[in-house]
Image (tube, helix red, strand yellow):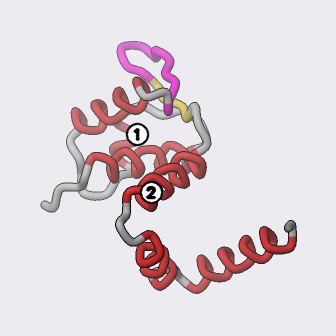
Amino acid sequence: MKRRALGQLEAEVLAALASLGGSAGTAELRSRLEGDPAYTTVNTILFRLYEKGFLTRARAGRHYRYRLAIDESEFVADRMHDHLRHASDPGGVLSRFVQALSADEARKLRELLGREGSAE
């Protein structure tokens, strides 16, 4: 089984939690992740995200239920900005990113860029 980078798994856990629209426990989130990660791995990721301030948690019996404390789109956008800021060729990164977009994603990006351009 191919191992994911921790940043990727963090993003997948956040996306799974966002898709639920509420709170969830470790087992529930684990069942929504691809690749059958270990319960302890998911629990560790949840704890790290909680410590970073991305999640809140509440005791539910012997376990915790987690809820997003941040906006998922803001988190992902911040990560994208970090990657661009550290890239030696940000234009090349953006070019490859745009080339990999689906037709719907490209349409949405054009729509957003058109809105931004008309606001100036």
Residue at coordinates 46% horizontally, 14% vertically from top-left? Answer: 59
Q: Is residue 108 magenta?
A: no
Q: Which of 28 and 10 is in front in this view?
A: 10
Which label belongs to residue 79? none
Query: Residue 68 at x, y = what percent?
Result: 55, 35
- Left or right: residue 21 versus residue 28 is right
Q: Label 2, on which residue?
A: 85
Q: Does the magenta stretch include residue 59?
A: yes
Q: Nearer the viewer, residue 52 or 84?
A: 84
Which image quadrant for residue 25? top left
Quadrant (top left/top right/bottom left/bottom right) for the C terminus = bottom right
Residue at coordinates 27% horizontally, 46% vertically from top-left? Answer: 6
Quadrant (top left/top right/bottom left/bottom right) for the N terminus = bottom left
Residue type highlighted by circle 1: Glu
Outermost residue on the front side: it is 88
Q: Label 1, on which residue?
A: 28
Residue type highlighted by circle 2: Arg
Helix, strand or loop: magenta stretch: strand
Q: In this view, does 30 lie above or below 59?
A: below
- Left or right: residue 22 versus residue 54 is right
Query: Residue 76 at x, y = what percent?
Result: 51, 52
Q: For numbered disc 2, what is the local secondary structure?
A: helix
Which image quadrant for residue 89? bottom left
Label 2, label 1: how many angstroms apart (C-alpha)? 35 Å
Q: Give the range drawn in magenta.
A: 54-64
Which mark sits nearer the N-terminus, 2 or 1?
A: 1
